[in-house]
Image (cartoon, rainbow, N blue to C red):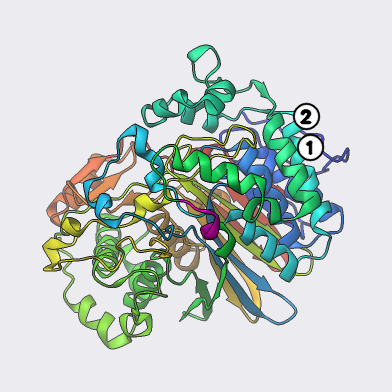
């Protein structure tokens, strides 16, 4: 049985709120007005501490994201990038910021056709980091407090130490993290004596503490124009990377317009390009009504099959049409036209599964965070370094982990089954690779009533879509939603991946409908969510990555 426990905050305060021990967390109170949900208990408690210090939802999520890069370095950090969506309660409108990594100007696009890269050339996949620039702009545009006051607590977490989470311990022990043990910086912290670090161990990161303190006091300039940036460049170039001083100096986040879908009395705002996750969610909503899904029944074979067919159509659209919107002018409005989706819906049979051309992507290192404050502002942010521990490289002095985000570009051979000779998501100087990240807000009468987002690469969009529908169609609360069994639509092999524990009757039903099923060997994905019911806030964090949710 989980026990509530209190954790001292880095600033010396104490959060009087319930935290559920691993696995996962759910928090609810009859008087709750604020909430924080992330994939790590330390990150969550620091977000709540920021609210207690007078910050708003944006201040809290920036502080929590900086801490996430310390306590969950396999998933996120200053060397990565991401997306943010904020609901501004005063103006009743969304704010969307894209701080995705970009390809260096000197990228060797031809080399990307021969992936995977050799270990000694793994920084070829390192993009220009956008994390710091994005958090800086987000906090300066919408935060209430001073940057230094929001950022310094993260430095204290790295200085004072933190308990290694079960997820970080698992990530260090995973087969795809073996290369990380060859990097001196990562090995010294996460592979002591040549073995993966164990969950529960107390860990300090003095190098990253110094870096964060410097950035808190001096702003982003040391990273994008100074010594910190020069070290990142040297580290990347030593392993085949193309990162340059001009790439860092010229990087900027991009404000974008959210995809908006009106569905059954709700306004759903989700992430636009270069995320493909929002398109999948919007297309699925556009193809089915609440009444139709209710008739099918939550979790039935018919329900899962029809959702999977809609998702496969969205994946096909992703491969054929989607790229960085500054390079590829995909018309999302056209893709979401009701007549087009109606035609696709008519082509879906309850008794037949449509095949998807083989394609494979690999995204693992991601972290989603959510905050709601007392004024009704909601911040939803997904941050990533791509694969576990990114490029498996750290800058020796700063302790920053480099990303391998450019691996999300698509090879020409992977779109050949569509009759195409090149992908709209191909590597080009300055381009941002297409992502699956899907921060999403559900609004009714001008107020957010549900917010969610997730981690886990390709699983993000399918997970967010499934749980959003389970909430809007079947009215399930957050603590029940995060525990629901989920399915995935793979790019190769079987047509449907199911979590362990699926009943034989469900497998037989799916097989009758033409689905070729397989059980996932593991599910490294997680969804965080916050709901508001009659003014009362509840939050839940996915047990799959041992997250934490707090309300107050």
- Give me the disc on residue 160: 2
> Considering only vertical position in the picture, is 164 above or below 551?
above
For this view, does 435 lie left or right of residue 63?
left
- Give me the disc on residue 304: none
CB under 8 Å between callouts 1 and 2?
A: yes
| Rendered image quadrant of residue 205 | top right
Q: Quadrant of the N terminus?
A: top right
Locate residue 11, reporting x and y percent. 86, 41
Look at the image and tell me whether residue 477 can be seen.
Answer: no
Q: What is the distance, in whole Å, between disc 1 and disc 2 at their CAs?
A: 6 Å
Residue count near mark 2 (Cα–Cα under 10 Å), binned few <14, some 14–19, many ≥20: some
| Rendered image quadrant of residue 176 | top left
> What span is colored magenta in the figure?
243-247
> Considering only vertical position in the picture, is 326 above or below 381?
below
Q: Which residue is mark 1?
A: 156
Q: Nearer the viewer, residue 5 or 40?
A: 40
Locate residue 174, reporting x and y percent. 41, 27
Q: Is residue 245 inside the magenta stretch? A: yes
- Residue at 54% across / 52% down in the picture? 383
């Amino acid at each position: 049985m989980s026990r509530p426990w209190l954790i001292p905050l880095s600033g010396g305060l104490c959060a009087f709120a319930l935290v559920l021990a691993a696995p996962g967390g759910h928090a609810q109170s009859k008087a709750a007005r604020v909430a924080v949900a992330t994939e790590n208990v330390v990150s969550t408690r620091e977000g709540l501490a920021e609210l207690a210090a007078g910050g708003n939802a944006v201040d809290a999520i920036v502080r929590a994201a900086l801490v996430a890069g310390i306590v969950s370095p396999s998933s996120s950090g200053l060397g990565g990038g991401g997306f943010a969506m904020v609901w501004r309660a005063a103006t009743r409108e969304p704010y969307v910021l894209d701080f995705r990594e970009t390809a260096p100007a000197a990228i060797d696009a031809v080399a990307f056709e021969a992936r995977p890269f050799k270990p000694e050339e793994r920084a070829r996949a390192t993009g220009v980091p956008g994390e710091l620039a994005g958090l800086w702009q987000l906090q300066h545009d919408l935060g209430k407090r001073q940057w230094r006051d929001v950022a310094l607590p993260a430095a204290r977490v790295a200085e004072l130490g933190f308990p290694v989470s079960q997820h970080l311990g698992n990530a260090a022990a995973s087969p795809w993290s073996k290369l990380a043990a060859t990097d001196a910086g990562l090995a010294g912290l996460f592979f002591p004596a040549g073995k993966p670090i164990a969950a529960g161990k107390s860990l300090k990161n003095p190098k990253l503490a110094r870096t964060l303190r410097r950035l808190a006091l001096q702003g982003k300039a040391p990273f994008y124009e100074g010594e910190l940036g020069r070290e990142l460049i040297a580290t990347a170039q030593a392993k085949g990377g193309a990162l340059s001083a001009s790439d860092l100096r010229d990087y900027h986040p991009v404000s974008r317009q959210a995809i908006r879908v009106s569905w059954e009395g709700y306004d759903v705002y989700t992430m636009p390009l270069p995320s493909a996750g929002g398109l999948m969610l919007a297309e699925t909503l556009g193809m089915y009504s609440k009444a139709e899904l209710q008739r099918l029944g939550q979790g039935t074979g018919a329900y899962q099959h029809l959702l999977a067919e809609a998702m496969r159509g969205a994946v096909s659209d992703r491969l054929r049409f989607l790229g960085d919107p500054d390079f590829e002018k995909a018309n999302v409005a056209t893709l979401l036209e009701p007549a087009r989706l109606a035609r696709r819906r008519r082509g879906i049979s309850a008794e037949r599964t449509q095949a998807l051309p083989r394609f494979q992507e690999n995204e693992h290192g991601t972290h989603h965070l959510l905050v709601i404050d007392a004024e009704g502002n909601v911040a939803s942010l997904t941050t990533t370094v791509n694969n576990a521990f990114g490029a498996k490289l750290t800058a020796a002095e700063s302790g920053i982990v480099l990303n391998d985000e450019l691996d999300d570009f698509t090879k020409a051979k992977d779109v050949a089954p569509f009759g195409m000779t090149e992908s709209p998501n191909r590597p080009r100087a300055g381009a941002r690779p297409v992502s699956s990240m899907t921060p999403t807000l559900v609004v009714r009468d001008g107020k957010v009533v549900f917010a969610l987002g997730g981690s886990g690469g390709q699983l993000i969009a399918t997970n967010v879509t499934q749980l959003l529908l389970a909430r809007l169609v079947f009215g399930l609360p957050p603590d029940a939603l995060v525990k629901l069994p989920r399915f995935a639509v793979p790019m190769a092999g079987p047509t449907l991946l199911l979590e362990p524990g699926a009943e034989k009757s469900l497998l037989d039903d799916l097989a009758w409908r033409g689905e070729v099923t397989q059980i996932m060997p593991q599910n490294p994905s997680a969804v965080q969510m916050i709901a508001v019911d009659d003014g009362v806030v509840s939050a839940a964090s996915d047990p799959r990555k041992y997250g934490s949710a707090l309300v107050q």
